Amino acid sequence: MKNLIFYIHLNTVKILLLGNEAIAYGALAGEVAVATAYPGTPSTEILETLEEFRDRFVHWATNEKTALEIAYGAAVAGARALVAMKHVGLNVAADPLHSAAYTGVEGGLVVVSADDPWMHSSQNEQDTRWYGLQAYVPVLEPSDPAEAYRYAKTAFELSEKLKHPIILRSVTRVSHVRAPVEVEPPSPPKWGRFSKDISRFNLVPAYARERRKALVEKWGTIGEVSAELMRVEPGGHVTIVTSGVAYNYVKEAVRLLNIDATIIKLGMPVPIPPKIRELVKGTVVVVEEGDPIVETQLRALRLETKGKIDGYFPKYGELNTRKVAEGIAKALDIPYNPPQPPKSPIEAPPRPPVLCPGCPHMGTFYILRLATAGLNPVWSGDIGCYSLGINTGQQDLITHMGSSVGLGMGVAVASKQFVVATVGDSTFYHAVLPQLIDLATKKVPLLVVVMDNAYTAMTGGQPSPSRLIPPEKIAETFGIPAFVIDPADIKTSIEVTKRAVEIVKSGRPVLVVSKRPCVLVATRKARKAGVAIPKYKVEPEKCIGCGICYNLLKCSAIQARPDRKAYIDPALCVGCGMCAEVCPVDAIKGDGARVKWLEVWQQA
Amino acid sequence: MATSLVIVGVGGQGALTLARWIGEAALAAGYDVRIAEIHGMSQRGGSVEVHVRFGKEVYAPIVEEGGADYVVALEAVEALRAYKYLKPSGVLVANKRVIQPPGKWVDPQFVLEAITKSGIKAYVLPCFDIAMELGSPIYENAVMLGAVSKLLNLPMPESLDERNREAFRRGARLVV
Ligand code: SF4
Ligand code: SF4
């Protein structure tokens, strides 16, 4: 356990752990042997933590479905397996999840799905607990890192006891909160051995029908298990039912409002324990983050509730103490005056998300803009750093993983417009591979650009298969011509890309692979190796203030001075030299170390 | 009751580390702690916001507008953005440094004046300058830590190395 802060306090060892790290340590205490994931904020740190334990099988899969399948297979064979993803990833893995409930498992199978209310880094809000109801998979919901640790361990025990998969639902404010956690040393991994059972593990209709009946029956007994994870904090003649992170806001709100309420905290919100009916008294207020899942189930038990359904709490976004206090006050018809925030003396100019200085994507977007000049393309985008191409007006359609080529084909077929589909290497393997087959068989004219930076960069640089299985090789196997460019070499790349554009104009698909590793990974490695990173400077007497470097290339290390001349922040410049290439009057100069640096960078 | 801090800065300045140091010190002082890392999509150069709450009993991990006892800003423009979190009785601790937001040049003098004349209790500190005197901008957050720890009456975190300890002591001397 490196880099962790330990505290020996009253004979207990407490560590400030991130919720995701806590889930990982809980899994280690729960004898996890196989752990898989596809990275996605806010879930990524779970597998990153487990990666350090070399006595287990830990794997970053190409997508969530594959990740779940590997873990499911391991659990079917009796091992303890964990798979982690973000909420939208569970959509990708939904198919095997439903089957896992039918066959059940032998070891423990824990599916961690981290929701992102208010979309801090996601394309939609989604409540993972619906999948629990839909797939008949019980959901555990921790409220903080300490509970995340305990529930991860409990989830394995329960899963193995029930021989059933378990979902562990986190949200941003559990996964990305650091709090003291008491941690035991990891337990040895539990591996397994597959025992054949034809009628259980073969979901052909005759057998699946029997499994369906068994599943519905089992679901009834799981309600009793749910009761064991419920905690009742007795109080007055008002009941607040809550679950997960919402519990924390309830605790603060009742203190603020100075009310005496009975608090029922559900550890397993899906399914709710039917015996909760006998425990509630007075007005029943339901506080949960996400959709009204607990509330809907309570209403199915014919309980009258006040929660999200009738608008006591907002139906979107994250909760906080104020929203919860306001909702409870309204439900109980008591006064509440929230604090009034002071007004800032001046409005701070925004600092919107931008591509990192020297990001290879910034070169690629510039190259694409010039190579398609006059064609007014539709930019069909995808999920990853390159979605920030929105800043240069080069993203028109970003909806989900793989939307670039899939939706791009649809647009091209429907409208005959010139379409550029931009996708990163990790997303390429995650979701675009099958679409490439459709592209090849139907020969839809599409300029597919793979921005191959060799890592899943937006989530912090997890490995991608791009060097072992290069995208251009795959395209050629499918009969799609492919070109490789280097985004740092802007002039040559524009010429090559123009050739690709001609092929699309003649009615055929083309792949352009723009290859240069993520600049963050490269600078990190260069610093360690002691390789000099050049700095670029603007010669103010030469600069004509055309804005090409800061408005079109849009390097975030370059700012416009009040006189429109460019200024390079030396603390931010990473010496890619792209600005010097695009400046029409040669006003930007480096310090000579570029060639060596670009070589080292390409190997990063 | 808990003490609530909102720590802000620009990506790469070490706001997350600063929050962890404060959390570490609060834990060592016997408090319960919550640190919520509010990072968005930008890795470098974007606004960074971290919420820290500590006290005998802490539940909520995030601070709402009008709920912070302290706003600690490693960068002056971000101080203005986080202003809304302050309680009317809250204290602003801001680094003097301005890092230019993309596409819009702001006058540093104007920003600092806005802070000092805002009417809220504010400390405007030369953390960056001291860090440069110590040899590197990376000590900026440790200087700020020194000042904040003094105000919060928290101990120096054990995990600081010698250079950061010196930065901490220099920061502590900035507030009296
Ligand atoms: S060399 Fe130019 S384009 Fe590259 S990071 Fe530095 S300022 Fe930006
Ligand atoms: S591209 Fe060259 S001339 Fe144009 S603003 Fe930048 S430095 Fe000045």
Image (cartoon, rainbow, N blue to C red):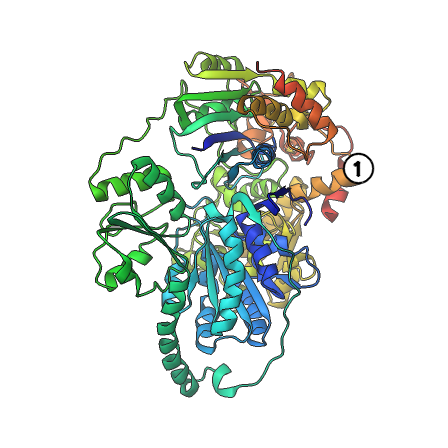
Task: State the image quarter where residue B129 is shown.
Answer: top right
Does residue A383 show up?
no
Query: Which corner quadrant of the image does residue A543 belong to?
Result: top right
- List x then y, in percent, for residue A227: 37, 63
Q: Residues within 10 Å of mark 1 (few under 14, many from 20)?
A: few
Q: Amino acid at mark 1?
A: Gly
Q: Quadrant of ligand 2?
A: top right
User: Relative to A452, is A264 on the left or the right?
Assistant: left
Against A482, residue A600 (above or below) is: above
Q: Is residue A340 left or right of residue B93?
A: left
Instruction: Work out whether B156 lies above or below A489.
Output: above
* Residue holding disc 1: A530
Where, by quadrant of the figure, is residue B137 drawn? top right
Note whether A473 is above or below A77 in the view shown.
above
Q: Position of residue A235 (x, y in %)?
A: 30, 48
**Position above or below: A98 against A344:** below
> What residue is drawn where x is 40% and y is 51%?
A124
Residue at figure coordinates x 53%, y 86% from the top left: A197
Report the chain holding disc 1.
A
Percent x, y of residue B25: 59, 33
Local secondary structure at mark 1: loop
A577 or A312, nearer to the observer: A312
Q: Nearer the viewer, residue A471 or A497?
A: A471
- Name the residue rendered at 39%, 51% in the picture: A125
x and y, in percent, of residue A442 in the image? 49, 67
Q: List the single residue furthest toward the front.
A: A10
Q: Nearer the viewer, residue A470 or A184?
A: A184
Label 1 CB less than 8 angstroms from ligand 1: no
For image coordinates 50% across by 53% down, the residue present is: A148
